[in-house]
Image (cartoon, rainbow, N blue to C red):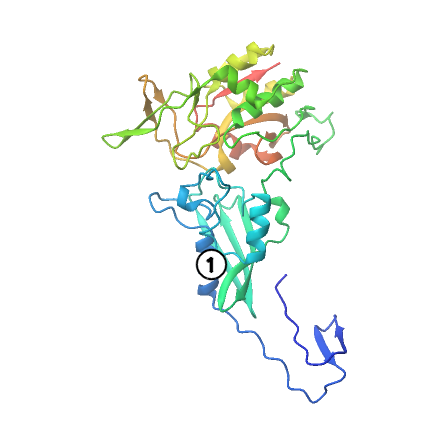
């Protein structure tokens, strides 16, 4: 919905909603109100490009929030200084410490901006992550400057504490449980507690299915963290070993190389110490085995990419000499909790339960060598 301003010179007036007309009863001879200027498509697109700019050092697109800090929120809270926002929207975001989209942790390799000019502003649609995420922005003119004023259905994109409550979400039932080759497990959904604790949250959900209650922090305490800074040697990345511990700061940024994640041996270690039963683990676990596990009643923690984007491998050598499967910013872990003939049901610790086409899941699942942990 665009922003429409009604200007009247009379005290008494009536709005004809169906026709979108204002009839002034006490000033029939008054001149018609001036129509707000129509911005150009290019001007609106420039606002979208400022809200989701190209990273100055890499070939991908990021969010304007915390842009001066390479995506890492300063101690004082999120930095919105680089965003083209009205005072109203800025105040709202500052109060809730939320974002314009669920993309502050990992960048997008694609960006498409569609603009619809309207008098006094317009509507922007920004498409990211190879069309997997679409952000709607309402733009208005303030003192001759185009600024983002609001988002339709904003709550679907906010990631602050007000929308990321640490409570189970009901598992959606899409098909009858008796359908051939179909099953949905009653696994609770939990939002990851930290910026990069997707692996811990995924394990937490799987353990809850076994009746084991835990937290992201308890899992991370068992795994430990390697706080060594990422470095480059002759242009090649060197960093910690996610097979051994969590790499970096769990509240860091994959974009800024201040935080990354952890791989299957650490999840197995935590699951075992917390009393969980691990049925299978490792790399090279084919999708068919994942589906069979779910059909047999076992949730599966799998390593995929954020927003299901196809990433190119750029493996690095850890400080201990191990070659690490790496695809740049975008590593993510989820829990597979359901399956039907064409799709898998994912408990995504960042965005909630979602159905994903098997073909897409299988392609993205290959990124980290078909890495998975099957729980009882």
Q: Circle 1: is it few (<14), some (14-19), or many (20+) Cα within 10 Å?
A: many
Asked if residue 203 can be seen in this view, the reply is yes
Image: 170 above or below 121: above
Residue in the foreground of this view, choosing between 55 and 367 = 55
> In which quadrant is the C terminus drawn?
top right
Residue at horizontal 55 percent and vertical 47 percent from the top: 94
Residue at horizontal 61 percent and vertical 29 percent from the top: 347
Residue ID for mark 1: 47
The percent coordinates of residue 100 (x first, y second) are 54, 48
Residue positioned most to the bottom: 29
The percent coordinates of residue 130 (x first, y second) are 47, 44
Q: Does residue 39 appear to the left or right of 12 in the view shown?
A: left
Image: 56 above or below 193: below
The percent coordinates of residue 254 (x first, y second) are 42, 34
The percent coordinates of residue 229 (x first, y second) are 35, 27
Q: Does residue 308 appear to the left or right of 188 in the view shown?
A: left
Which quadrant of the view contains residue 164? top right
| Local secondary structure at mark 1 | helix
Residue in the foreground of this view, choosing between 30 and 243 = 30
Residue positioned most to the left: 234
Q: Does residue 156 appear to the left or right of 38 in the view shown?
A: right
Image: 193 above or below 75: above
> In which quadrant is the N terminus drawn?
bottom right
Residue in the foreground of this view, choosing between 356 and 42 = 42
Q: Does residue 226 appear to the left or right of 375 in the view shown?
A: left
Number of marks: 1
Image: 339 above or below 283: below
Which quadrant of the view contains residue 277? top right
Asked if residue 61 can be seen in this view, the reply is no
């Amino acid at each position: 919905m665009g922003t429409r301003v009604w200007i009247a010179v009379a005290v008494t007036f009536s709005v004809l909603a169906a026709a979108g007309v204002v009839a002034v009863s006490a000033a029939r001879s008054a001149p018609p109100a001036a129509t707000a200027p129509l911005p150009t498509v290019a001007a609106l697109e420039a606002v979208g490009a400022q809200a989701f700019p190209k990273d100055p050092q890499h070939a991908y697109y990021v969010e304007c929030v915390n842009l001066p800090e390479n995506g890492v929120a300063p101690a004082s809270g999120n930095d919105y200084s680089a965003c083209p926002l009205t005072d109203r929207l800025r105040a709202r975001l500052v109060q809730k410490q939320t974002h314009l989209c669920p993309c502050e942790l990992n960048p997008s390799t694609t960006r498409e901006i569609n603009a619809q000019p309207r008098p006094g502003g317009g509507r922007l649609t920004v498409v990211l992550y190879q069309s997997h995420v679409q952000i709607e922005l309402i733009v208005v003119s303030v003192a001759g400057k185009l600024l983002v004023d609001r988002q339709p259905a904003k709550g679907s994109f906010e990631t602050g504490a007000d929308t990321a409550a640490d409570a189970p979400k009901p598992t959606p039932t899409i098909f009858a449980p008796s359908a051939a080759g179909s099953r949905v497990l009653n696994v609770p959904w939990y939002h990851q507690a930290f910026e990069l604790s997707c692996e811990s949250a995924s394990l937490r959900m799987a353990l809850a299915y076994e009746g084991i209650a835990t937290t992201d922090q308890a899992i991370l305490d068992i795994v430990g963290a390697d706080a060594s800074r990422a470095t480059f040697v002759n242009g090649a990345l060197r960093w910690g070993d996610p097979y051994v511990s969590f790499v970096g700061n769990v509240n860091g940024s994959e974009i800024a190389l201040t935080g990354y994640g952890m791989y299957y041996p650490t999840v197995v270690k935590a699951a075992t110490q917390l009393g969980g039963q691990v049925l299978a683990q490792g790399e090279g676990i084919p999708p068919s085995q994942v589906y069979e596990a779910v059909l047999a009643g076992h949730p599966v923690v799998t390593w995929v990419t954020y927003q299901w984007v196809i990433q190119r491998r750029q493996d690095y050598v850890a400080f201990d000499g191990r070659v690490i499967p790496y695809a740049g910013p975008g590593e993510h872990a989820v829990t597979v909790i359901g399956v039907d003939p064409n799709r898998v049901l994912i408990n995504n610790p960042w965005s909630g339960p979602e159905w994903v086409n098997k073909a897409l899941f299988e392609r993205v699942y290959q990124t980290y060598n078909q890495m998975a942990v099957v729980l009882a």
